[in-house]
Amino acid sequence: MAFELRGQRVIVRDWRDSDLPAWVAMNADPEVRRYFNGTLSEEQALGEAGRIRAHAEQHGFTFWALEIPGVADFAGFVGLLRTSYETPFTPCVEIGWRLSRATWGKGYASEAARLCLDYGFEQLGLDEIVAMTTVTNTPSRAVMERIGMTRNPADDFNHPFLEAGHPLQAHVLYRKRKGQP
């Protein structure tokens, strides 16, 4: 059975092969990838999409495709993922999003993220969900705060996939516990 969460303006759903061209284009956009370690080639983007889809098969949840009816058949992803690296706060389930530039600033990420948080707590039985980003990513940090996540600066960390001194290495960690408003 296909996965789908419906909000007032968004649909969070399983990936389709037809999503992949828009995914590749989105990850070639330097603005979309501004808070990551560069843009992705077509091969890299397709590899990442494959890993995201495989996570769904392995765990029953993932960074799902985001559809905005009447606006975009594929606008990026929003969802939940088990982290694949070690830090003081892992193991954990992370909520994340990455949207095409044309859909920024309209509240789609916040609406879809709330759906995913509810799903994680109510359907998956998670006690806590975390979110993380580079210190300078104020748009994503604003989404984290809008969906009720909180930050303790003592939890901030250096991302282990980025070398020491990299301008994006310093990351903030936000948390939300089940039942927290």
Image (spheres, rainbow, N blue to C red):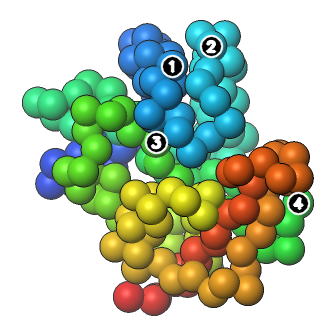
Q: Secondary structure at mark 1?
A: loop
| Numbered disc 3: secondary structure | strand
Residue placed most toward the observer, 16 or 111 = 111
Q: Which of the marked residues, 3 or 1, is nearer the chain's N terminus?
A: 1
Point 78% across, 48% down: residue = 166
Q: Is residue 133 above or below residue 44?
A: below
Residue 15 higher or lower than 34, as above or below: above
Q: Amino acid under label 4? A: Glu
The image shows residue 164, relative to residue 173, as above or below, that is above
Label 4 – label 1 distance at C-alpha: 28 Å
- Front label number (3 vs 2): 2
Q: Is residue 3 left or right of residue 38?
A: left
Instruction: Judge depth for marks 3 and 1 and give the one in front.
Output: 1
What residue would you read off at disc 2? Answer: 41
Q: Look at the numbered discs 1 and 2 and tell me whether their residues touch, using CB distance below 8 Å.
A: yes
Contact between labelled residues 2 and 3, with CB atoms less than 8 Å apart: no
The residue that disc 3 covers is: 98
Is residue 118 visible from the viewing direction of this image?
no
Residue at image x 46%, y 88%? 179
**Residue 173 visible in the picture:** yes
Percent from the top left, x then y, of residue 139?
40, 58
Q: Marks 4 and 2, Cα distance to the nearest angstrom? A: 27 Å
Q: Amino acid at mark 2?
A: Ser
